[in-house]
Image: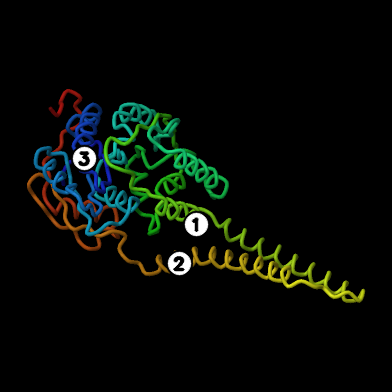
Amino acid sequence: MTQTPFLSIVAPCHNEEEGLREFCRRAAAAAQSVAGDAFELILVDDGSSDGTWEIISDLAAKVPQVLGVRLLRNHGHQLASTAGLSASRGEHVLLIDADLQDPPELLLMMMPIMERGADVVYGQRTRREGETWFKLASASLFYRTLSRFASVSIPRDTGDFRLMRRRVVDILLAMPERDRFIRGMVSWIGGRQVALPYERDARFAGTTKYPLRKMINFALDAITSFSTTPLRIATWLGMISAGVAMALLVYTFVRWLQGETVTGWSSIMAAVSAFSAIQLICIGIIGEYLGRLVQESKRRPMFMVETILRGGDQAELPTTFSEMSAGDRRAALDSAFAPAELPRPQKSNRIK
């Protein structure tokens, strides 16, 4: 049995070739400050189309703590993060994006908070550099809508940037849903979760991997994963529509008794269009939930790993890796290749 590292840093990467080396340098320096050489840096290539994997391979050959995980195709940020967490073995796990908007150096502030008893230390943005007004406005609307609808308390203005204890990570990985919203799932787990306010930097290089279409899909996943309120809204819309229709029927009957004929096809068409729109909205809301139930019922693997890389050694993981228990995943990683023994935390070592 190989020695458990003190710290794992998990970073999903999609077309991050321009800033990946700088991220690795800063993340490794931060990790060494708190864990010496007893850490691992897990870089997950989420189906990149540029030179991201080549850079990960080069970094793994030069830095013994780097573990490269290459997914068979692009699975999206949440599943790529899940793949990296599944490959992690550390007693503490830092989940962070590789674009350097979230400074790795904040690990030095997170660790003392965790040592005082926190189960999760999450970054909470006080300012976001380099964002457009539309991105800021839409993000603000999303978080406030989610906090109103969600069945659990999900902190506002937070991403997936957080430091977690091993037990929290294991519970998170045991949750089987495919449409994952990691920050909400971690909030659902509970325990002592502490915010660390910080100012988010602009991207070091490249462009955002969350265009409007992905932002909308992500918001739908978040709301439908943690709230049934939209279904209740659909019910209330149906009841209101039925009430309005009944009132129109009574109004028409009364006018008929008075010998007056209700004229004007435009008003009828307007009413029919309004009710049709409400019906379609309700069907769409129900369809969102039903579609997710269908996807969950298929029980397909959450992600598929093509290869893992440490140093100059490549290995393959079982196709059922994403469905394994925590103990089986650890055994699969240990049997893939025998990693070098990692020393316990020593703050004197540094990567040059």
Q: Is residue 277 left or right of residue 192?
A: right
C-beta proximity under 8 Å, tags 2 and 3: no
Q: Is residue 107 above or below residue 241?
A: above
Amino acid type of the residue that numbered disc 2 sits on in the rendered structure? Gly
Q: CA distance from mark 3 to mark 1?
A: 35 Å
Residue at 11% in and 41% down:
340
Q: Is residue 251 left or right of residue 346?
A: right
Disc 3 or disc 1, which is closer to the eye?
A: 3
Task: Farthest residue to the left: give it.
Answer: 312
What is the x, y in percent for residue 206?
Answer: 27, 41
Q: Residues within 10 Å of mark 2 (few under 14, many from 20)?
A: few
Observer-nearest of 268 and 251: 268
Disc 2 or disc 3, which is closer to the eye?
A: 3
Q: Report which quarter residue 168 is drawn in.
A: top left
- SS of the residue under disc 2: helix
Observer-nearest of 333 and 302: 302
What is the x, y in percent for residue 348?
Answer: 17, 23
Residue 241's label in the rendered image is none
User: Which residue lies under the disc numbered 3?
Assistant: 18
Q: CA distance from mark 2 to mark 1?
A: 11 Å
Amino acid type of the residue that numbered disc 1 sits on in the rendered structure? Thr
Residue 224's label in the rendered image is 1
Amino acid type of the residue that numbered disc 3 sits on in the rendered structure? Glu
Residue at 16% in and 55% down:
307
User: Which residue lies under the disc numbered 2?
Assistant: 291
Q: Earlier in the sequence, mark 2 or mark 3?
A: 3
